[in-house]
Image (cartoon, rainbow, N blue to C red):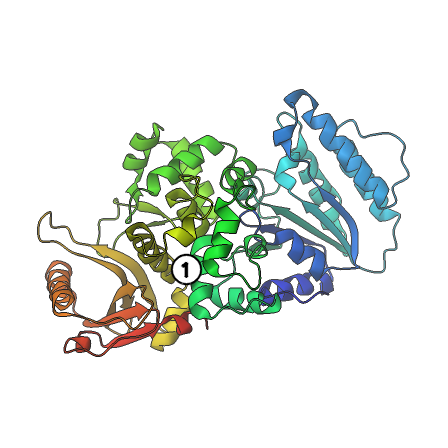
Amino acid sequence: MEQIIGRRAEIDELQDCYKSKRSEFVVIYGRRRVGKTYLVNNAFAGHITFQHTGLSPFELKEEVLLRSQLFNFYTSLHRFGYEGTKTPGNWLEAFDALAWLLESKPQDEKQVVFIDEIAWMDTPRSGFVKAFEHFWNGWGANRNNLLLVVCSSAASWVMDNIINSRGGLFDRTTREIHLSPFTLGETASYFESQGITYDHYDTLQAYMAVGGVPYYLSFVKPGASVAENIDNLFFVKNAKLKHEYQNLFTSQFASPEACEAIIKSLSTTKIGCTRAEIAKACNISSGGTLTQLLNALIESDFIVSYVAYKGKKRNVKYRIIDPFLLFCSKFHLKTTNENFWRNNQNSPSLAAWRGLAFENVCFCHVPQIKTALGINGVHTEVLPWHSEQKAGGAQTDMIIDRADRIINICEMKFYNTDFVVDKKYDEVLRNKLNVFLNETKIRKSPVMTLITTYGLGQSPYAGRFQEVITMDQLFS
């Protein structure tokens, strides 16, 4: 097996399934380009009995979708030893042919069946799901040597048709793996494996632009600065990721235009939007359809939902959590300057984005922040806080409400040197703390906490922060 960066827990789980004495049905889902196919192919290298990838339906006309998918499945069957001479006429026949193929193989070892991009195979009125249910329930589940692995970037399809199925696949999976992007630490390890010698500051900047998506990170070139790489990825002619923003939506969602409109509306605000605000901005009815769209975006690791600390439960907000989408919605679709990033390093727009992007990265690394605070075993709630006051209010980037009767009030600051608290900012912090204590009426000990790049510089006001976490600790 080729060396895989990270993914240790997922590899161990897949290996457990391979060693199992029963049939296993594993579903792996996650955003596009996160490495699902790579994980399976490497975890089971040399041991895959049958492999198939659904055809992308977006380049095919609807009248030939089913026929094209069936013929593609037929060619995969032949590639792995099927001797039938007739293309299946429907999915029941197709899966019956797969069962025949597997029965013709040796039965004394695990048979790994890998179906990739399974959601693409479920074309309109094709009967695919029913046939797939029958294959597993009527044949596969009754064996003791089958390992069925299915993958999809369409997380909402997986949730609706497999994991939360109301039909024959209800509660049928034996393992479910949600494959998430790399952490900062895994990204640093990946760069090292590719000969990219970035320090933590540069790795952090790259991560804030493309996130921890292995496919995107694979285009970062050794020897080039972060600014050069970002221009080459997004802004130059024929840039590798120039069209990836649109492709994300068309490849993952049944309603790509609506999902893209939601992301666009969320990109206009730091604290996110309510359902009502999204519905109004996107002209979508605030009912079941909007719920499905929001859930699809959440399952794809694109957005998160939250209720502000001590906020009313009905005031649920949604905000972008994916660094790549946050970056694209701010910059690369809005300029034709091929050297945009190198030419604007010190611009106010980039400074504002860095602050927001760093805050976003911190929310993606809460386990690392808890480790830095020494509270891994302590139950916590981690949320933003927004004052209810219309005048003289305040807000805090992150609140860590701890079961040990301490509450960390966190400020995130992205700087290229130690962050220094001056008199003006000290006044802001004192006001923020007073408003927070008065509004929340908490009976826990507040601890002002700074999360920053390099550290806290010396000043008469440095004592305002009792805890300091640096970017190095986010890489743990």
Q: Does the rendering let one see residue 376?
A: no
In the picture, which quadrant includes the N terminus?
Answer: bottom right
Tag 1, which secondary structure?
A: loop
State whether residue 145 is above or below residue 171.
below
Q: Is residue 421 left or right of residue 331?
A: left
Of residue 183 and residue 223, the one placed in the foreground of this image is 223
Residue at 46% x, 31% y is 257
Q: Can you identify the residue that label 1 sits on?
A: 364
Q: Is residue 314 left or right of residue 239?
A: left
Residue at 62% x, 48% y is 172
Residue 244 in the image, given as x and y percentages of width and height: 53, 42
Residue at 61% x, 42% y is 169
Q: Does the rendering let one see residue 167?
A: yes
Q: Is residue 268 left or right of residue 76?
A: left
Question: How many callouts does the rendering have?
Answer: 1
Quarter of the view holding residue 131: top right
Of residue 270 and residue 352, the one placed in the foreground of this image is 352
Residue at 14% x, 50% y is 388
Of residue 300 and residue 211, the one placed in the foreground of this image is 211
State whether residue 265 is above or below residue 103.
above
Residue 36 in the image, given as x and y percentages of width and height: 62, 53
Identity of the amino acid at label 1? Cys
Quarter of the view holding residue 410: bottom left
Residue 315 in the image, given as x and y percentages of width and height: 25, 45
Of residue 272 and residue 162, the one placed in the foreground of this image is 272
Residue 307 in the image, given as x and y percentages of width and height: 28, 51
Q: Within 10 angstroms of label 1, few (less than 14), some, or many (20 or more) residues?
A: some
